[in-house]
Image (cartoon, rainbow, N blue to C red):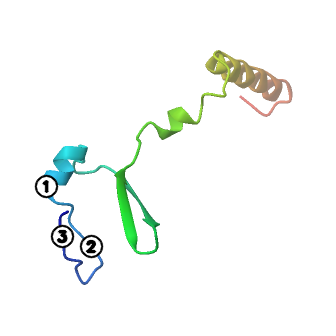
């Protein structure tokens, strides 16, 4: 277990060995949570999290959106609201 020092601005540095083992590089996001009262878990944030949240969308979702945009544009044109 590595020990780190908390700075006066409440910052800590993740030791190089741990960053390399987990694959954390500059610019990556991490998530933190408290468990068992005084333990903190830090984990690399999943950059594909949004992709995981879109599994419920139909396969032809892009086609559906395109169709809705075209329909809306045509309606606005008929109403004189779109050039």
Q: Which element is circle 3 on?
A: loop
Q: Which element is circle 1 on?
A: helix
Which residue corresponds to mark 2?
A: 11
Instruction: Please say if 69 is above or below 12.
Output: above
Q: Nearer the viewer, mark 2 or mark 1?
A: 1
Q: Which mark is residue 16?
A: 1
Label 3 to label 1, Cα distance in Å? 12 Å
Instruction: Please say if 12 is above or below 67.
Output: below
Report whether 3 appears left or right of 62.
Answer: left
The first of marks 3 and 2 along the sequence is 3
The first of marks 3 and 1 along the sequence is 3
**Residue at point 58% right, 36% down?**
53
The C terminus, quarter of image: top right
Q: Nearer the viewer, mark 3 or mark 1?
A: 3
Q: Position of residue 73 (x, y in %)?
A: 74, 25
Instruction: Please say if 78 is above or below 36.
Output: above
**Residue at point 28% right, 80% down?**
9
Closer to us: 4 or 30 = 4
Q: Which element is circle 2 on?
A: loop
- Quarter of image, res 75: top right
Closer to us: 22 or 49 = 22
Q: Position of residue 12 (x, y in %)?
A: 24, 70
Q: Which mark is residue 3?
A: 3
Report whether 78 appears left or right of 53.
Answer: right
Q: Position of residue 61 (x, y in %)?
A: 65, 21
Q: Position of residue 48 (x, y in %)?
A: 44, 36
- Asked if disc 2 and disc 1 are in contact, CB closer than 8 Å, the reply is no
| Crowdedness near tag 1: few (<14), some (14–19) or many (≥20) residues, C-alpha within 10 Å | few
- Furthest residue in direction left, as rendered: 16
The N terminus, quarter of image: bottom left
């Amino acid at each position: 277990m590595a020990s780190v020092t908390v700075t006066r601005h409440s910052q800590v540095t993740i030791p190089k060995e741990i960053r390399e083992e987990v694959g954390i590089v500059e610019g990556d996001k991490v998530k933190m949570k408290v468990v068992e009262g005084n333990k903190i878990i830090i984990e690399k944030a999943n950059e594909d999290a949004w992709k995981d949240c879109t599994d419920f969308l139909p396969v032809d979702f892009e086609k559906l959106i395109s169709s809705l945009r075209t329909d809306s544009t045509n309606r606005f044109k008929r109403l004189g609201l779109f050039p």
